[in-house]
Amino acid sequence: MRVLFFAHLKDITGCAEMNLPGGDLDADGLWQKLIEAHPGMEQVRASVRLAKNSEYVGRDACFTDVDEVALIPPVSGG
Amino acid sequence: MEIKIQLTNASICERLPAPTSGVGAGAWVDFRGVVRGEENGAVIAALEYEAYSPMAEMEMRRIIAELAGDHHCLFVRVIHRVGIVPVGEAAICVGVAARHRAEAFALLAGFMNRLKQDVPIWKRRALTATELTELKTK
Protein backbone atom coordinates (compact mmCIF):
# COMPACT_ATOMS: atom_id res chain seq x y z
CA MET A 1 0.00 0.00 0.00
CA ARG A 2 1.03 3.59 -0.60
CA VAL A 3 1.65 5.55 2.60
CA LEU A 4 1.84 9.36 2.52
CA PHE A 5 3.57 11.64 5.04
CA PHE A 6 2.87 15.32 5.52
CA ALA A 7 4.34 18.37 7.25
CA HIS A 8 6.92 17.51 9.94
CA LEU A 9 6.35 13.79 9.39
CA LYS A 10 8.41 14.23 6.22
CA ASP A 11 11.29 15.44 8.37
CA ILE A 12 10.97 12.42 10.66
CA THR A 13 10.79 9.85 7.87
CA GLY A 14 12.98 11.66 5.35
CA CYS A 15 10.41 11.02 2.62
CA ALA A 16 6.98 12.10 1.42
CA GLU A 17 5.74 8.58 0.79
CA MET A 18 6.66 4.94 1.00
CA ASN A 19 5.33 1.65 -0.23
CA LEU A 20 4.39 -0.91 2.40
CA PRO A 21 4.14 -4.36 0.86
CA GLY A 22 2.81 -7.39 2.65
CA GLY A 23 -0.97 -7.55 2.41
CA ASP A 24 -3.77 -6.51 4.72
CA LEU A 25 -3.06 -4.66 7.95
CA ASP A 26 -5.12 -3.26 10.79
CA ALA A 27 -4.22 0.12 12.29
CA ASP A 28 -1.96 -1.37 14.97
CA GLY A 29 -0.20 -3.51 12.37
CA LEU A 30 0.29 -0.49 10.15
CA TRP A 31 1.83 1.52 12.97
CA GLN A 32 4.10 -1.37 13.90
CA LYS A 33 5.49 -1.50 10.36
CA LEU A 34 5.84 2.27 10.17
CA ILE A 35 7.73 2.42 13.45
CA GLU A 36 9.98 -0.43 12.34
CA ALA A 37 10.82 1.55 9.19
CA HIS A 38 10.98 4.96 10.90
CA PRO A 39 11.50 4.68 14.68
CA GLY A 40 10.91 8.42 15.14
CA MET A 41 7.27 7.90 14.27
CA GLU A 42 6.60 6.33 17.66
CA GLN A 43 6.90 9.71 19.39
CA VAL A 44 4.22 11.30 17.23
CA ARG A 45 1.81 8.36 17.05
CA ALA A 46 -0.60 9.77 19.65
CA SER A 47 -1.10 13.01 17.73
CA VAL A 48 -1.35 11.57 14.22
CA ARG A 49 -4.65 10.57 12.60
CA LEU A 50 -4.96 8.01 9.83
CA ALA A 51 -6.82 8.52 6.57
CA LYS A 52 -7.67 5.84 4.03
CA ASN A 53 -8.32 6.92 0.44
CA SER A 54 -8.76 10.55 1.56
CA GLU A 55 -11.13 9.90 4.50
CA TYR A 56 -10.34 9.81 8.20
CA VAL A 57 -10.59 6.34 9.72
CA GLY A 58 -10.67 5.08 13.29
CA ARG A 59 -8.50 2.63 15.19
CA ASP A 60 -10.60 -0.26 13.90
CA ALA A 61 -9.73 0.42 10.26
CA CYS A 62 -8.19 -2.20 7.98
CA PHE A 63 -5.90 -1.45 5.06
CA THR A 64 -5.23 -3.43 1.90
CA ASP A 65 -2.53 -3.24 -0.76
CA VAL A 66 -4.62 -1.00 -3.00
CA ASP A 67 -5.35 1.61 -0.34
CA GLU A 68 -3.71 5.01 -0.13
CA VAL A 69 -2.99 5.68 3.52
CA ALA A 70 -2.19 9.18 4.76
CA LEU A 71 -0.72 10.07 8.12
CA ILE A 72 -2.27 13.35 9.19
CA PRO A 73 -0.44 15.31 11.90
CA PRO A 74 -2.33 18.16 13.65
CA VAL A 75 -3.51 20.55 10.95
CA SER A 76 -2.93 24.31 10.79
CA GLY A 77 -4.62 25.69 7.71
CA GLY A 78 -6.36 29.02 7.34
CA MET B 1 -26.59 24.76 -2.19
CA GLU B 2 -23.63 25.24 -4.50
CA ILE B 3 -20.13 24.65 -3.12
CA LYS B 4 -16.93 25.66 -4.89
CA ILE B 5 -13.56 24.66 -3.45
CA GLN B 6 -10.18 25.58 -4.84
CA LEU B 7 -6.59 25.10 -3.72
CA THR B 8 -4.15 27.29 -5.58
CA ASN B 9 -0.52 28.39 -5.69
CA ALA B 10 -1.57 31.75 -7.12
CA SER B 11 -2.38 34.93 -5.24
CA ILE B 12 -6.01 35.26 -4.17
CA CYS B 13 -5.72 38.91 -3.26
CA GLU B 14 -7.66 40.21 -6.23
CA ARG B 15 -11.25 41.23 -5.71
CA LEU B 16 -13.55 38.22 -5.97
CA PRO B 17 -16.90 38.52 -7.71
CA ALA B 18 -20.17 38.09 -5.85
CA PRO B 19 -21.90 34.71 -6.28
CA THR B 20 -23.69 34.19 -9.56
CA SER B 21 -25.87 31.37 -8.30
CA GLY B 22 -27.01 32.96 -5.06
CA VAL B 23 -30.45 33.86 -6.32
CA GLY B 24 -32.51 34.93 -3.35
CA ALA B 25 -29.44 35.88 -1.37
CA GLY B 26 -29.84 38.83 0.98
CA ALA B 27 -26.39 38.38 2.53
CA TRP B 28 -22.95 37.83 1.08
CA VAL B 29 -20.27 37.40 3.73
CA ASP B 30 -16.66 37.53 2.62
CA PHE B 31 -13.78 36.46 4.87
CA ARG B 32 -10.06 36.56 4.26
CA GLY B 33 -7.45 35.05 6.51
CA VAL B 34 -4.14 36.80 5.94
CA VAL B 35 -0.60 35.93 6.96
CA ARG B 36 0.51 37.87 10.04
CA GLY B 37 3.98 39.40 10.28
CA GLU B 38 4.93 37.31 13.29
CA GLU B 39 4.87 33.62 14.11
CA ASN B 40 5.58 32.31 17.60
CA GLY B 41 6.94 35.71 18.60
CA ALA B 42 9.37 36.00 15.68
CA VAL B 43 9.14 38.46 12.78
CA ILE B 44 8.49 36.63 9.51
CA ALA B 45 8.10 37.51 5.84
CA ALA B 46 6.00 34.57 4.64
CA LEU B 47 4.49 31.22 5.51
CA GLU B 48 4.70 28.10 3.41
CA TYR B 49 1.49 26.07 3.29
CA GLU B 50 1.23 22.41 2.37
CA ALA B 51 -1.93 20.43 1.65
CA TYR B 52 -3.05 16.90 1.04
CA SER B 53 -5.10 18.34 -1.79
CA PRO B 54 -7.63 15.60 -2.68
CA MET B 55 -8.55 15.03 0.95
CA ALA B 56 -8.52 18.73 1.84
CA GLU B 57 -11.05 19.45 -0.90
CA MET B 58 -13.25 16.51 0.09
CA GLU B 59 -13.09 17.40 3.78
CA MET B 60 -13.99 21.05 3.18
CA ARG B 61 -16.94 20.01 1.04
CA ARG B 62 -18.08 17.52 3.69
CA ILE B 63 -17.81 20.07 6.52
CA ILE B 64 -19.75 22.71 4.59
CA ALA B 65 -22.51 20.24 3.67
CA GLU B 66 -22.76 19.17 7.32
CA LEU B 67 -22.90 22.77 8.62
CA ALA B 68 -25.52 23.65 6.01
CA GLY B 69 -27.88 21.25 7.76
CA ASP B 70 -28.10 23.74 10.64
CA HIS B 71 -27.34 26.96 8.76
CA HIS B 72 -29.10 26.96 5.41
CA CYS B 73 -27.04 28.84 2.86
CA LEU B 74 -27.22 29.21 -0.91
CA PHE B 75 -23.62 29.30 -2.02
CA VAL B 76 -20.18 28.78 -0.47
CA ARG B 77 -16.85 29.41 -2.11
CA VAL B 78 -13.51 28.56 -0.50
CA ILE B 79 -10.12 29.33 -1.98
CA HIS B 80 -7.09 28.23 0.05
CA ARG B 81 -3.61 29.08 -1.06
CA VAL B 82 -0.71 26.60 -0.85
CA GLY B 83 3.01 27.17 -1.25
CA ILE B 84 4.67 30.44 -0.20
CA VAL B 85 2.27 33.14 1.02
CA PRO B 86 3.91 36.51 1.86
CA VAL B 87 2.88 38.49 4.94
CA GLY B 88 -0.24 40.54 4.34
CA GLU B 89 -1.55 38.30 1.56
CA ALA B 90 -4.57 36.06 1.91
CA ALA B 91 -4.03 32.41 2.74
CA ILE B 92 -7.75 31.73 2.59
CA CYS B 93 -10.81 33.44 1.20
CA VAL B 94 -14.31 32.23 2.04
CA GLY B 95 -17.50 33.65 0.59
CA VAL B 96 -20.92 32.62 1.84
CA ALA B 97 -24.28 33.65 0.41
CA ALA B 98 -27.55 33.14 2.30
CA ARG B 99 -31.03 34.59 2.46
CA HIS B 100 -30.18 36.30 5.75
CA ARG B 101 -26.91 37.31 7.40
CA ALA B 102 -27.28 35.12 10.50
CA GLU B 103 -27.00 31.87 8.54
CA ALA B 104 -24.05 33.14 6.51
CA PHE B 105 -22.12 34.33 9.59
CA ALA B 106 -22.86 31.08 11.45
CA LEU B 107 -21.76 28.83 8.61
CA LEU B 108 -18.61 30.87 8.08
CA ALA B 109 -17.64 30.75 11.78
CA GLY B 110 -18.36 27.05 12.01
CA PHE B 111 -16.41 26.31 8.86
CA MET B 112 -13.30 28.18 9.98
CA ASN B 113 -13.36 26.36 13.33
CA ARG B 114 -13.65 22.98 11.64
CA LEU B 115 -11.04 23.86 9.03
CA LYS B 116 -8.50 24.35 11.78
CA GLN B 117 -9.36 20.98 13.31
CA ASP B 118 -9.90 18.64 10.39
CA VAL B 119 -8.77 19.88 6.99
CA PRO B 120 -5.33 18.48 6.04
CA ILE B 121 -3.53 21.74 5.36
CA TRP B 122 -0.43 22.76 7.26
CA LYS B 123 1.73 25.79 7.85
CA ARG B 124 4.91 23.98 6.85
CA ARG B 125 7.42 26.66 7.82
CA ALA B 126 7.87 30.36 8.43
CA LEU B 127 10.34 32.27 6.27
CA THR B 128 12.38 35.30 7.24
CA ALA B 129 12.87 38.19 4.80
CA THR B 130 16.31 36.83 3.92
CA GLU B 131 14.99 33.34 3.27
CA LEU B 132 12.17 34.71 1.13
CA THR B 133 14.59 36.81 -0.92
CA GLU B 134 16.89 33.83 -1.43
CA LEU B 135 13.95 31.73 -2.56
CA LYS B 136 12.85 34.37 -5.07
CA THR B 137 16.34 34.66 -6.59
CA LYS B 138 16.77 30.90 -7.11
Image (cartoon, coloured by chain):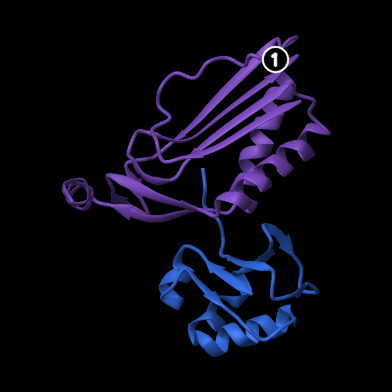
Q: Position of residue B31 (x, y in %)?
A: 54, 27
Image vertical order of residue A40 relative to residue B62, above or below: below
Residue position for label 1: B22
Q: Is residue A64 above or below residue B129?
A: below
Relative image position of residue B24 (x, y in whole percent): 75, 9
- Give the residue type at disc 1: Gly
- For the residue carrying disc 1, how many other residues have a C-alpha within 10 Å: few (<14), some (14-19), or many (20+)? many
| Point 60% across, 71% down: residue | A2
Q: Chain of mark 1?
A: B
Q: Residue at x 66, y 27 (%)?
A: B76
Residue B127 on image: x %, y %: 28, 52
Please identify the residue farthest to the right as the structure is shown: B69
Q: Colour of chain A?
A: blue
Front residue of B34 and A33: A33
Image side of residue B6 versus residue B72, left or right: left
Q: Residue at x 37, y 40 (%)?
A: B36
Q: Residue furthest front?
A: A66
Chain letter, purple: B
